[in-house]
Amino acid sequence: MDELLGHESAGSGPMLVLIHGFPFDRRMWAAQGALAQERRVVALDLPGRGLSAGISVEGATIESYADQVAELIRAETGSVGTQADVAGLSMGGYIAFALWRRHPGLVRSLLLSGTRAGADSEEGKAARTANADIAWAEGTIGLAEKMLPKVLAPATGDEIRNRVLQMFDETPGLTAIADLVAMRDRADSTDLLATITVPTLVLRGDQDAVASEADARAMAEGIKEAEFAAIPNAGHLAPLENPDAWNEAVRAFYSHSMVAGGFDEMS
Ligand code: MLT
């Protein structure tokens, strides 16, 4: 098997694994370190960036990313039981779906933020290819002008904006291209929703211009044990833009859902 994904962790107890979106890295979860009071929070870097810069993205698919996350969960859970609470933002959510499809026994609960179950439309696929061309010609930063207004709420301040820009800038162009192809070719997970039996929280920034409220609500309705939380004053990157509200929604979900009971039994 490949080298383990690079990651940072904080806290102790059951593992909460955080899977970032595109074209970001583990740093988008900086404020979720606050959840380390309840969980061992593990923020990973997908292949080809950050602490996983040395891991090849050649032939990457959403499934191969999910297999690499599974390997990390197996390696890191050890004595606490081979299961993790899994959070995915957007592309990270597509990976969380693939993880459920391929390794359901590893998933204890799901947080699905700013994501959607459906595959790309033909128009969406063409846009992925066009974005890959931009990343090839200009590097990932070339996508920022087009994407930034979609991933951040208009009122999100410069400090967050600059941190997001830095992630665009530091994601290698070839990595962005691999992600774009993987997302373009991903499976439709709509039929998977009914098979998800673990407690799930669907979160969405109320100004998310990428993942619609209709998609988020449909996802929550399609999953048996799911709840929906709208995060105020936030766009697509809600955990970064309004971390207090995002973290609070997660804490409330963990404390009243089955996950809290499981936590007690396991710790
Ligand atoms: C992300 O944040 O991961 C992307 O917006 C996902 C996408 O483009 O579908």
Image: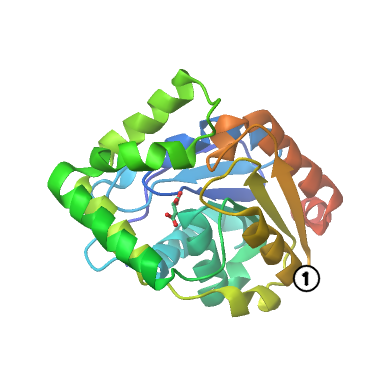
> What is the quadrant of residue 78 in the picture?
bottom right
Relative side of 103 to 56, left or right: right
Relative side of 26 to 181, left or right: right
- Residue 174 screen position, x and y as percent: 20, 52
> Which quarter of the rendering shows the N terminus?
bottom left
* Secondary structure found at label 1: loop
Classify 114 as above or below 159: below
Give the residue number, with chain letter if any, for mark 1. Answer: 224
Q: Is mark 1 within 8 Å of ligand 1?
A: no
Along the line of sight, the residue nearer the viewer: 115 or 257: 115
Q: Which colour scheme is used?
A: rainbow
Residue drawn at 38 percent across, 67 percent down? 123
- Residue 152 screen position, x and y as percent: 50, 35
Residue drawn at 67 percent across, 38 percent down? 246
Q: Which amino acid does label 1 sit on?
A: Lys
Q: How crowded is mark 1: few (under 14 residues within 10 Å), some or many (20 or more)?
A: some
